[in-house]
Image (cartoon, helix red, strand yellow):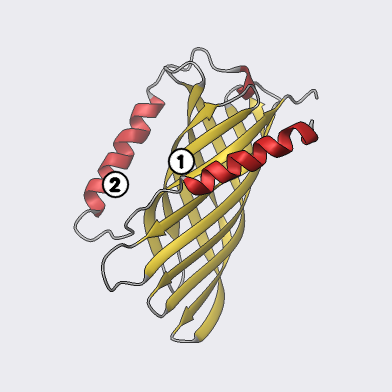
Amino acid sequence: MLNILKPVLFKGFQFVFMTLSVFKDRWTGQKNRVMKNLIFLIVTILSISVQQGLSQTEKGNLFWGGNAGLDLNLEKGVDEFSIALNPDVGVFVMDKLAVGANVGFTFYKFDDTKLTTLNVLPLVRYYSTSAAERSLFFLEGKAGLALATTDIFGESDTETAFQFSAGPGVAFFISDCMALEGLLTYNHITGNLERKNVGLTVGLQVYLNGDE
Protein backbone atom coordinates (compact mmCIF):
# COMPACT_ATOMS: atom_id res chain seq x y z
CA MET A 1 0.00 0.00 0.00
CA LEU A 2 2.86 2.41 0.83
CA ASN A 3 4.39 1.82 -2.61
CA ILE A 4 1.13 2.93 -4.18
CA LEU A 5 0.84 5.98 -1.94
CA LYS A 6 4.42 7.24 -2.35
CA PRO A 7 4.03 8.87 -5.81
CA VAL A 8 0.65 10.29 -4.84
CA LEU A 9 2.06 11.74 -1.62
CA PHE A 10 4.98 13.27 -3.53
CA LYS A 11 2.64 14.99 -5.97
CA GLY A 12 0.40 16.07 -3.11
CA PHE A 13 3.22 17.73 -1.19
CA GLN A 14 4.39 19.40 -4.41
CA PHE A 15 0.92 20.86 -4.71
CA VAL A 16 1.01 21.99 -1.06
CA PHE A 17 4.21 23.97 -1.41
CA MET A 18 3.17 25.46 -4.76
CA THR A 19 -0.08 26.75 -3.25
CA LEU A 20 1.26 28.20 0.04
CA SER A 21 -0.74 31.35 0.64
CA VAL A 22 0.91 34.72 1.09
CA PHE A 23 -0.34 36.77 4.02
CA LYS A 24 0.66 39.95 5.78
CA ASP A 25 1.41 39.22 9.39
CA ARG A 26 0.40 42.62 10.75
CA TRP A 27 -2.41 43.17 13.22
CA THR A 28 -2.39 46.92 13.85
CA GLY A 29 -5.84 48.40 13.28
CA GLN A 30 -7.29 45.05 12.13
CA LYS A 31 -6.94 42.67 15.09
CA ASN A 32 -10.48 43.07 16.46
CA ARG A 33 -12.06 42.64 13.04
CA VAL A 34 -9.97 39.52 12.28
CA MET A 35 -10.86 37.94 15.64
CA LYS A 36 -14.60 38.64 15.18
CA ASN A 37 -14.53 37.05 11.72
CA LEU A 38 -12.66 33.98 13.04
CA ILE A 39 -15.13 33.51 15.91
CA PHE A 40 -18.06 33.88 13.51
CA LEU A 41 -16.55 31.23 11.20
CA ILE A 42 -16.04 28.79 14.07
CA VAL A 43 -19.63 29.26 15.30
CA THR A 44 -20.94 28.73 11.76
CA ILE A 45 -19.03 25.45 11.36
CA LEU A 46 -20.27 24.20 14.73
CA SER A 47 -23.86 24.83 13.62
CA ILE A 48 -23.52 22.68 10.48
CA SER A 49 -25.50 19.43 10.49
CA VAL A 50 -23.56 16.39 11.74
CA GLN A 51 -26.11 13.76 10.77
CA GLN A 52 -23.97 11.86 8.28
CA GLY A 53 -20.27 12.01 7.34
CA LEU A 54 -17.76 10.17 5.22
CA SER A 55 -16.64 6.73 6.42
CA GLN A 56 -13.05 7.95 6.88
CA THR A 57 -14.02 9.54 10.20
CA GLU A 58 -15.50 6.41 11.81
CA LYS A 59 -14.29 5.17 15.19
CA GLY A 60 -11.03 3.22 15.04
CA ASN A 61 -9.73 4.78 11.82
CA LEU A 62 -6.39 6.58 11.63
CA PHE A 63 -5.00 9.64 9.89
CA TRP A 64 -1.48 10.90 9.29
CA GLY A 65 0.03 13.67 7.22
CA GLY A 66 0.63 17.33 7.93
CA ASN A 67 0.44 20.90 6.73
CA ALA A 68 2.73 23.83 6.00
CA GLY A 69 2.38 27.60 5.91
CA LEU A 70 4.35 30.63 4.80
CA ASP A 71 3.68 34.23 5.87
CA LEU A 72 5.36 37.14 4.12
CA ASN A 73 5.23 40.86 4.82
CA LEU A 74 5.15 42.58 1.44
CA GLU A 75 5.61 46.08 2.81
CA LYS A 76 8.59 47.75 1.19
CA GLY A 77 11.67 47.91 3.42
CA VAL A 78 10.31 45.46 6.01
CA ASP A 79 12.17 42.17 6.48
CA GLU A 80 9.51 39.95 8.05
CA PHE A 81 8.39 36.41 7.33
CA SER A 82 7.56 33.11 9.01
CA ILE A 83 7.35 29.46 8.00
CA ALA A 84 5.62 26.56 9.76
CA LEU A 85 5.80 22.78 9.23
CA ASN A 86 3.36 20.55 11.13
CA PRO A 87 3.32 16.76 10.58
CA ASP A 88 0.66 14.98 12.63
CA VAL A 89 -0.99 11.63 13.38
CA GLY A 90 -4.29 10.75 15.03
CA VAL A 91 -6.91 8.10 15.78
CA PHE A 92 -10.70 8.40 15.85
CA VAL A 93 -11.84 7.56 19.39
CA MET A 94 -15.45 7.94 18.28
CA ASP A 95 -17.20 8.82 15.05
CA LYS A 96 -16.00 12.27 13.85
CA LEU A 97 -13.80 12.85 16.94
CA ALA A 98 -10.05 12.23 16.73
CA VAL A 99 -7.14 12.73 19.11
CA GLY A 100 -3.48 12.64 18.24
CA ALA A 101 -0.17 14.46 18.28
CA ASN A 102 1.45 17.19 16.23
CA VAL A 103 5.19 17.78 15.79
CA GLY A 104 5.68 21.43 14.94
CA PHE A 105 8.49 23.62 13.66
CA THR A 106 8.08 27.39 13.34
CA PHE A 107 10.61 30.01 12.28
CA TYR A 108 9.80 33.74 12.51
CA LYS A 109 12.07 36.64 11.50
CA PHE A 110 11.56 40.38 11.84
CA ASP A 111 14.61 42.50 10.95
CA ASP A 112 17.31 41.42 13.48
CA THR A 113 14.92 39.41 15.64
CA LYS A 114 14.41 35.66 15.14
CA LEU A 115 12.16 33.14 16.91
CA THR A 116 12.39 29.37 16.42
CA THR A 117 10.03 26.92 18.13
CA LEU A 118 9.97 23.12 18.28
CA ASN A 119 7.13 21.21 19.91
CA VAL A 120 5.18 18.01 20.27
CA LEU A 121 1.58 18.97 21.03
CA PRO A 122 -1.52 16.85 21.70
CA LEU A 123 -4.33 17.69 19.27
CA VAL A 124 -8.07 17.21 19.04
CA ARG A 125 -10.16 17.27 15.86
CA TYR A 126 -13.93 17.24 15.44
CA TYR A 127 -15.36 16.69 11.95
CA SER A 128 -18.70 17.95 10.68
CA THR A 129 -20.63 17.14 7.51
CA SER A 130 -20.09 19.42 4.53
CA ALA A 131 -22.64 20.31 1.87
CA ALA A 132 -20.12 19.25 -0.81
CA GLU A 133 -20.05 15.56 -1.73
CA ARG A 134 -16.39 14.81 -0.96
CA SER A 135 -15.43 17.40 1.64
CA LEU A 136 -15.69 17.73 5.41
CA PHE A 137 -15.41 20.71 7.73
CA PHE A 138 -13.49 20.25 10.98
CA LEU A 139 -12.29 22.12 14.04
CA GLU A 140 -8.78 21.54 15.39
CA GLY A 141 -7.17 22.56 18.65
CA LYS A 142 -3.74 21.86 20.09
CA ALA A 143 -1.84 23.17 23.10
CA GLY A 144 1.24 22.39 25.14
CA LEU A 145 4.84 23.29 25.84
CA ALA A 146 7.32 24.28 23.15
CA LEU A 147 11.06 24.85 23.11
CA ALA A 148 11.51 28.45 21.96
CA THR A 149 14.83 30.01 20.93
CA THR A 150 15.06 33.77 20.45
CA ASP A 151 17.89 35.59 18.72
CA ILE A 152 17.84 39.37 19.17
CA PHE A 153 20.74 41.31 17.67
CA GLY A 154 22.91 38.18 17.82
CA GLU A 155 22.16 37.30 21.45
CA SER A 156 20.43 33.92 21.81
CA ASP A 157 18.22 32.62 24.59
CA THR A 158 16.28 29.35 24.89
CA GLU A 159 13.23 28.87 27.09
CA THR A 160 10.16 26.70 27.50
CA ALA A 161 7.08 28.50 26.22
CA PHE A 162 3.37 27.75 26.08
CA GLN A 163 1.91 27.33 22.59
CA PHE A 164 -1.76 27.30 21.64
CA SER A 165 -3.42 26.94 18.26
CA ALA A 166 -7.07 26.50 17.25
CA GLY A 167 -9.31 27.07 14.27
CA PRO A 168 -11.56 25.69 11.51
CA GLY A 169 -10.52 23.73 8.45
CA VAL A 170 -11.86 21.82 5.48
CA ALA A 171 -10.73 18.49 3.97
CA PHE A 172 -11.26 17.85 0.24
CA PHE A 173 -11.02 14.13 -0.51
CA ILE A 174 -9.14 13.48 -3.76
CA SER A 175 -9.47 9.73 -3.22
CA ASP A 176 -11.13 7.40 -0.73
CA CYS A 177 -8.14 7.61 1.61
CA MET A 178 -6.47 10.95 0.86
CA ALA A 179 -7.50 14.57 1.40
CA LEU A 180 -6.10 18.01 0.71
CA GLU A 181 -6.71 20.31 3.68
CA GLY A 182 -6.86 24.00 4.40
CA LEU A 183 -6.70 25.19 8.01
CA LEU A 184 -7.21 28.72 9.37
CA THR A 185 -5.87 29.07 12.92
CA TYR A 186 -5.29 31.54 15.70
CA ASN A 187 -1.79 30.95 17.10
CA HIS A 188 -0.32 32.16 20.38
CA ILE A 189 3.23 31.62 21.66
CA THR A 190 4.21 33.02 25.06
CA GLY A 191 7.69 33.89 26.28
CA ASN A 192 10.22 36.68 25.87
CA LEU A 193 9.13 37.20 22.27
CA GLU A 194 5.39 36.67 22.62
CA ARG A 195 3.64 36.30 19.28
CA LYS A 196 -0.01 36.13 18.23
CA ASN A 197 -1.23 35.71 14.67
CA VAL A 198 -3.87 34.23 12.41
CA GLY A 199 -2.48 32.04 9.64
CA LEU A 200 -3.62 29.76 6.83
CA THR A 201 -1.87 26.45 6.19
CA VAL A 202 -2.46 23.82 3.51
CA GLY A 203 -1.60 20.17 3.75
CA LEU A 204 -2.25 16.54 2.94
CA GLN A 205 -3.76 13.81 5.13
CA VAL A 206 -3.99 10.05 4.56
CA TYR A 207 -6.93 8.26 6.21
CA LEU A 208 -6.58 4.55 6.98
CA ASN A 209 -9.08 1.95 8.12
CA GLY A 210 -8.14 0.86 11.62
CA ASP A 211 -8.73 -2.80 10.71
CA GLU A 212 -6.08 -2.75 7.95
State how many labels appear. 2
Q: Residue furthest left?
A: 29
Residue drawn at the location 50% of the way across and 76% of the way down: 150
Task: Answer with the quarter of the image where residue 48 lies.
Answer: top left
Vertical order, 116 against 25 (above or below): below
Viewer-side label of 2, 1? 1
Q: Nearer the viewer, residue 187 or 108?
A: 108
Please rate how many residues cluster around mark 1, counting C-alpha atoms within 10 Å: few if below 14, some from 14 to 19, many from 20.
many
Residue 141 seen in the figure: yes
Residue 35, disc? 2
Q: Amino acid at mark 1?
A: Leu
Name the amino acid, label 2. Met
Residue 83: mark: none
Mark 1 lies on residue: 183
The x and y percentages for residue 98 are: 61, 32
Task: Residue at 78% x, 35% y: name it.
Answer: 2
Residue 101 in view:
no
SS for dot 2: helix
Q: CA distance from mark 2 to mark 1?
A: 15 Å
Q: What residue do we see at 45% from left, 48% from top?
A: 20
The x and y percentages for residue 194 are 41, 67
